[in-house]
Each structure stands twice: as structure tokens, then as C-alpha cells.
Amino acid sequence: MAKTQYNADSITVLGGLEAVRKRPGMYIGSVGTKGLNHLIYEIMDNSVDEHLAGFCDSIWITLEKDGSCTVRDNGRGIPVEMHKMGMSAERVVMTTLHAGGKFDNNAYKTSGGLHGVGSSVVNALSEHLTIRISRGGQVYQDTYARGIPTTKLENGLLPVIGRAKGTGTETNFKPDPEIFEKTRFKEEWLRSRLHETAYLNPGLTIYYENKREGEEKQETFHEPEGIVAYVREINKGQTPIHDPVYFKGAYEGVELECALQFVDTFEENIFGFCNNIYTAEGGTHLAGFKTRFTQLVNTYARDLGILKDKDANFTGPDTRNGMTAVVAVKHPDPIFEGQTKTKLASADASKAVFMISGDELTHFFDRNVETIKAIIGCAEKSAKIRRAEEKARTNMLTKSKFSFDSNGKLANCESKDPSKCEIFIVEGDSAGGSAKTARNRMYQAILPIRGKILNVEKASMDKVLANAEIKTMINAFGCGFSEGYGNDFDITKLRYDKIVLMTDADVDGSHIDTLLLTFLYRFMPELIYDGHVYIAMPPLYKVVPKKGGKNGNGNAWDDGDGDAGNGGTGENTGTGKGGKGGKSGAGDKSGAGKADSGSLYLYDDKALEKYRQTHPDGSFTLQRYKGLGEMDAEQLWETTLNPENRVMKRVEIEDARLASEVTELLMGSEVGPRRDFIHDHADEAEIDT
Ligand code: 0RA
């Protein structure tokens, strides 16, 4: 791999940050919470790159009181010296698109994915940004507002604001509310990302601090055991059948690091990374790994006489049931594709992983025959169950193929135009009944489900397929499913453009959401990737101003950082409308929405509090909805079904991934982590969706 030469021309050609502000989605994916969090990752990735280059071992990430974020590292410090462009190199980096990478001769940059766009993009999208660089005994400072410098250079160079002990870079930035729908970083995602980064970079320590009011905490992420500890963590609460296997190697410029461990369940959990980026959609590295692993298990099974001549080979999934693995590659010039650009497409990664895994695992298994025997034992069990389930599945599919309309509980819609149809999955028979009365029967189908659906994380495949609720959903959606052994998922057959989970705004409701999301994430993840899955937001309160009292001035509308619909893209739109990531109506920005003449629906307690502040006691009557079941058909239509008024939150893949992780955690057999989780989340239980 040739060294990338830093040269001025490549910078001038690109230039200009207006483009970033005009089409922010192009650079950071979305202007929702996901894109917002990305700003932190962009800045942090530069520090991680400095770590990979061998010059930085600590990163400090702080969520500041004022809503800004500070990222600091102890690397060499971004160069501040005069650059060919006639100004400090730092300024070139911060004001020029794609300039960041050209400084560095490090082959494996974190910034390999879709959003590896560098600090200048964050600068462009920040209301203000301050950067302090410690280099050569001095601290230099530069400042910007929306990407435009606000510090005067002296002969092209940065002002010195103090003496430095060590070296490093510190960037503080505050996301621009003109750009982002919400400007509150999502801590849950951030912590998850920081921990992931620590696992992938065992020599790195990440000091996290939250200084936001009411959330104050400090946490250190340091995982000297790296991906082995990661695999152990993922398997926590389960029964491992051998110690984790770890290996690494390099082949034709591609590096691989891998850890794997089987547990006694039938799940496959393989996490792929390329240059520290989680490849949610998999790709060539995983393909190479899986192919070679299946071959190895079959070869050893025959060599050890476990598979006889007459026996068929284990299938790929047979050999991976129960496997937890982290497959992390470093590639000098990776290509990403797929729906969210998180699928590694580089063909040489497949070959490299295939070759390294083959050599290293053979080397290991030859010396640890008990381990490969235990793994073959898993494959045998899986193959047996697979054969039984293939039968069950054939029966299920033939039996229920044509039962779509005869499915007792589903009240289908009349239209057969999937682009216009919606299906509401409603908690409880009573709410289901009201919803059936209230709906627009042309386009809205209602599927009531009773109580908690089956937790697919824990149940075996035949139990899952025998579950009435799940069967009805699979039948109703019409697009099949993919999981483990078979894949007959076909999104073109999907009967509804929107799948809306409609549960009460209480603990039980969010539990059901979690279970439903886990089911969808495991069996039909494309529905989530393609943005077909929503969560309805039924209001908690209706306030009606009293005649003669001070009328509501709609203050609750301009919260700007409200939490109704937080986490998702959120939308407030009609049937068949609403492109991904667009700015949405006021309904998702505040915790309030308009009801009939003068009255207002409030979606959370925050909104109620706001309303109370602006409306003295006695000037309004307050109606609290305990649950969906309590609304009559008309109210249900008004608040939750009617595309004109309703507020829905679009589920993003991060929500689903976390839901799935949380489900695993909460349903796992170990009590400790569950208690910790409940303890940690007790105060956010009401509305943190
Ligand atoms: C290229 C060269 C040098 C430092 C960096 C990049 C650098 C960039 C960032 C971004 C965040 N933190 C960083 N730390 C370092 C230094 C070259 C030299 O000192 O010779």
C-alpha cells in the first residue's frame, strides 16, 4: 500500500463547508439523534486513529452541562504549523472537506466507512467549536461558528493561550439546532460505542464523563483483554462450553483479529468490524470466516470419525449455532455497500480472513482437540434440531399458507396496495376492539395481541413458529422471514408500508415493544433497515382550557428538545408519506400535540410540567389516559390512528439492536446484570424509548 501523500491540491479541490450545511444527511447519515451522535464519533475516531498510529493511549469524552461535547486526547496534537495554503494546518483541517486524512500516514484509518468524513463536517454543523492543541510546550486555540473561523490568525498562525505540559488535541463543539431536530446526545448509544471502541483497542483508555444536570457520572472504559473480553461479555449469563479461542494474523495487507466462544444455546452471534467500524450488514470478512469455519468443522468431524462416510456434512448454520464471535479486520482501503453502507464489500477481505482463519484455527484445534470436539458436539445437536424443525416448518407453512384472512384476530384492511396500507399491532383485546372500530378500514389493519409475546431470544425455533402471535404476524406481513436455517424473506411481498407497534406508555407496554422489536430484529431485520417499523405514541394527557381562563398559548409546542419520539427519526405524517431522515413536524419536537378546539394532547410528564408552568391551576381540566384500553374509539382515532394528528416514532436499527441486547440481558439467567440494569435505568423508565 502506497503512502498517501499529503498535498495541497487535493485539499483546494474539495473545500467549502456550505455543501455540508446544505445537505447534512449526505455527510452524517441523518439529522436525527443518530446523526447527532455521529458528530462525537467523527471527532473521537480521529483520536482513535492517532492511537492506532501509536501516539495516543487516552481519550476523554465529556458531555458538558451546556449541551456541548468535549473530546480530548493525548496524541501528538493536530499540526499547527504554517501550511502551504498560507495558514495554520489546523485551520486547513477544520475548514476543508476531507482534509483530515491527508495528514496521516497511518494505513488503517477508522474513517473508512460512509461517515468517515472528518472534523470539518462536525465543524460545519456546530453552532460553535473550540479546538485547543498542545504541541511543543504551547497551547494553541482556534474557534469557529458554524464552520466559519472566529479567531484572527497572526501571520496565518494560531494564537498561543498558555503553556502545555504534554501534547494532545481537545475539541469542544455544540451541535447547531438549525441543523438538528434534537440536539441532545443519546448517552446510551454513546456509552455503548465507547465500550465497543475500548474492546477493539485494548491499549486505549477512554474516560467518559457526563456533566449534564441530573445525569452526572464518570466512567472509564479500558479492556486490556480486548475482543476476548468482548466475547466473554456478550456471553455473560450463559453457559460457555469452552474457553474463548483467540487468534490473529495478516494476509496480503489485510489484518485479522478474531475471538470466538460457543455457549449451550442455539444462537449465532457474529460481530464483524472493519477498521473499528461495526459492519451491521456483515460482508466479505464474515463470509470468508463462515465458509472456512464450516469446512474446518466438517473436516475435523470426519477425521475424528464423528461424521461417517454415509453422513451428510453439517450445514454452515449447524456449525455456528451457539457461536459468539468477533471478527475484526483492518483493511487499507475498504469498500462498503448496502442499505446503510455497513456491509464490507472488499473481495480481498474474504480471502484474507479465509486463509488466516484456516491456518490459525487448524493450528489451535490440532493442539486443543477437546475444544473442536465440543464444537462438533454443538453442530450435531443443531443438525438434529434442524432436521426436526425443517419438518415443523414445512408443516407450519403448508398449514397456514392460505390462512391469512381466516386468521381470527387480524382485522385486515380492504386495500391491497401495500404502499398505502398500515398494520397496527395493538396491546390488549380491549384496545384492539376500539382500534378496529376507530380505524380507517380501507388502509388500516389491526392485529390485537394479548399480553407478552414470546421472547424469541430464549425460545427454540419450533416454539417460536408455534406461537400464535408470531405466526399471525408472519402470515399477516406476507414477506416470510429469515432466521438460522432458512431464509424465505422477500421484502417485495410485504403487505404493509408501515408496521406500527401500539402499546401503552407504561412499563408493560415498553416491555412488549422490546419483545416485538426483538422478534422483528431477529426475523425480519430488513423491515427495520428499510424504515417500515414505527412505534405509536399515544398521549398521556389531554388538557382542556376552561372557558374564560387563560388560554393555552401553545408553549408546550416549542420545547425544541422534547422527548416524545426521542431516539427515532419520529414523524407526524400521513399515510404513505415521510422520507427517511427528513425534518418532521412540530409533533415530534415537543411533547405536545393539538387536539380539538383549544385542547391539547400531552405525550409525557415533561410536557405536562411545561403546560402547568404556563397555565395557572384551575385554568384547565386535565384528563389522564391510563392506557389505550381506556380510550374510546373516537379518542383512539383522534390521538393515535389518524395520520393527520398522530405522533409516531420510526424505529432505527440502533433501537432494535439495543432492544435485543437489553432483552438478552433482562431475560438471561443471571440476576446480577438484570438488577444492575434495572437499577441504572430506574429513573428513565417512564419515557426513554
Ligand atoms: C497528523 C499528524 C500529526 C498529528 C495528527 C495528524 C493528529 C490528528 C488528530 C486529530 C485528533 N487528534 C489528533 N492527534 C493527532 C502530527 C505530526 C507530527 O507531530 O509530526
Image (tube, rainbow, N blue to C red):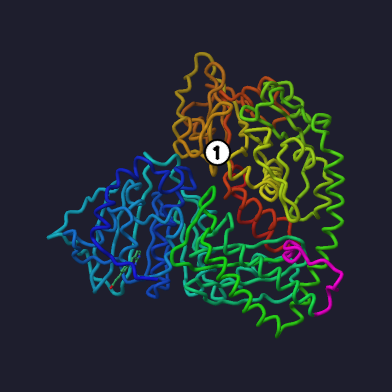
Query: Residue shown at 52%/18% (left/top)?
Result: 598
Q: Amino acid at mark 1?
A: Gly
- Name the main secondary structure of what is drawn in magenta: loop
Residue 603 at x, y percent in the picture: 57, 33
| Label 1 lies in ligand 1 vicinity (Cβ under 8 Å) | no
Tell me residue 183's x, y (percent). 43, 44
Task: State which quarter of the image contains the C terminus.
Answer: top right
**Between 203 and 63, which is closer to the camera in this rendering?**
203
Residue 380: quadrant of the picture: bottom right
Chain part drawn in magenta: 304-322
The quadrant holding residue 490 is: top right
Q: Which residue is mark 1?
A: 565
- 563 up-or-down from 87: above or below: above
- Residue lying farthest top? 548
- The one nearer the camera, 311 or 162, is 311
Where's ligand 1: which quadrant?
bottom left
Outermost residue toward the front in this view: 309
Say which residue appears at 50% left-offset and 67% top-offset: 220
